[in-house]
Image (tube, grey):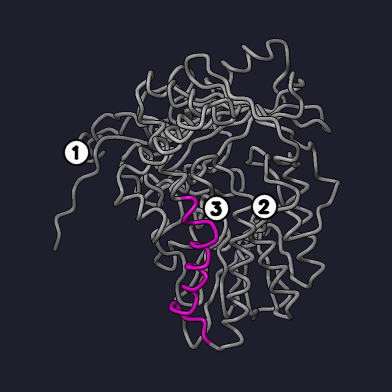
Amino acid sequence: MPAVKPKPNKTLLLDRETCISCAGCVGTCPDLALDMFGVDLQVFQDKCTYCTICVRFCPVGALSIVKTAPAAPTPSASGAPPAGLAA
Amino acid sequence: MPQSTAYDVVVIGAGPSGSLCARNLASKGYQVLLAEKRPVVGVPVRCGEATGRRARLSRFMTVNEEYIETDLNGVILHGPGGVSVRYDKDDVGLMIDRAKFDQDVARQAQRAGAELCVSTRIEGISPVKNGIRELTLVDEITKAKSVITAKLVVGADGVESLSGRWVGLKTRQLPPQVCSAIELRVDAMDANPNHLTFWQGHESVNKGYVWVFPKVKSGVVNLGSGVLTPKLGEKNMYDLSMEYKDRLFPDAKVLEVHGGAVPVSGNMEEYVADRFVLCGDAAHHTNPLTGGGIISGILGADIASTWIDAGFKAGDLGKEFLQQYQRDCWVQFGKNHRYQMRIRDFVVDLPLPAQTAFYRIFQGMVKGNLSMPSKFLGYTRMLGLAAGNWKTTKKAFFT
């Protein structure tokens, strides 16, 4: 069985205010991590390999890759729910 | 939702090439479904809207005056080092209203007997089973899924094509070979209302160009820029276009912003499979030098429909038979596109002084004021350097 690499602590961010729904990034993504539903661009984080092609391509700069904090410990281990899930 | 569940041909995407392919096949008596994922054909427009001569367009359809915006009389190209090349000639091309154009071609397809379904998204294509392919359809409004069958599928779903990947073709666009473009529709009129104006070269935008295309009938200017995929952190296309807009039309209003990708890799190596054909932008049938793809997309679709018809008549829609379409496209425009791609890559990679010299030669050739020997030298230098050496020249011309 091949070893499963842990996902790097990165996220592909889409700025919906800037996005002009041109769908150009959909064709450039090698991993099918982007798809257009009507005028709504969807990012599938689980498929993204952070190759930055779409970030470089985007004509308005609506896509970016940001580093995120390492995965929060599970609630059972820390005793409190992760900060992201609160409220 | 489509009326029937079994079709001879299903065309994905109602752009010019998809619609034209559907029209040609429907007029030959095949049952054709034209599936478009958007609610309105042609909207939003993702195009610079300049196209080839009227005569070239009228080879495929009767040109409707309704969508023609401007008859172009020339081209102005601003190169580096203050060299600008002006080329005046009647009938170099047309400016069209792309939304109206797309709708016109789709209407022609409908008149010929094809069934047009808008808001219909294809989600998947099955492998060939008993001589048919199954397609999963999603109605974008009700989100209802259904399955239809087709004897042959034409993928004309544009630059964001996924249909090729479903059948196992390598349609992925590698980063330097895709052009990132944006266009502003500016409420102004250009000083040269019948000319296309370009800026290219090291001083403005090297791996691409900035364009100003006037649309006289609607009184707007299409100002846009497109470059081969930039490196991370370089200026994006929107800022570049706005910079030019502020310089050229400081007081004018921006009415619309739209952008997209242009495949500029030249023809794909393989774009047919068993009972499957790609055409238009999806098959990268765009001119790698100019990024224009309306005429070559239509031409490709016309060739595709001829071979599909021949395939149905011969009872053979396998990959080997359909490869004749690919070969035909290569002869008609693919070869030429590859040659133009070499010229593009050559000019783009030149250092600034050499690029200026290149534009000087080009200017002299257009003006026609070069003496015979220098003209000859200019041509040979252009051709020779663009092709690199004899081996690649041979490859570009004779394969």
Expressed as whole percent of the image width and height from the top left, the position of residue B232 reads 35, 28
Magenta residues, start to end? B316-337
In the picture, the disc for residue B256 is none
Chain identifier of the residue bearing label 3 in the image:
B
Q: Farthest residue in the front direction? A: B372
Q: Residue at point 58% right, 61% down?
A: B300
- Few, some or many C-alpha atoms within 10 Å of disc 2 (few <14, some 14-19, many ≥20)? many
Residue A77 is tagged as 1
The residue mark sitting in front, 2 or 3, is 3
Q: State the image coordinates of residue B364 (x, y, percent, origin top left).
A: 54, 26
**Residue B355 in view of the camera:** yes
Residue in the picture at 46% in, 62% down: B164
**In terms of secondary structure, where does tag 3 sit?**
helix
Alpha-carbon distance for marks 1 and 2?
A: 48 Å
Image disc number at residue B38? 2
Per the image, the residue denoted by label 3 is B281
Task: From this view, report whether residue B309 is shown above or below residue B337.
Answer: below
* Residue B62 included in the magenta stretch of the image: no
Of residues B386 and B368, the one nearer the viewer is B368
Image quadrant containing the N terminus of chain B = bottom right
Q: Is B130 above or below relative to B56?
A: below
Which is more toward the observer, B77 or B126? Answer: B77
Q: Residue at x 50, y 63 (%)?
A: B331
Q: Is residue B330 magenta?
A: yes
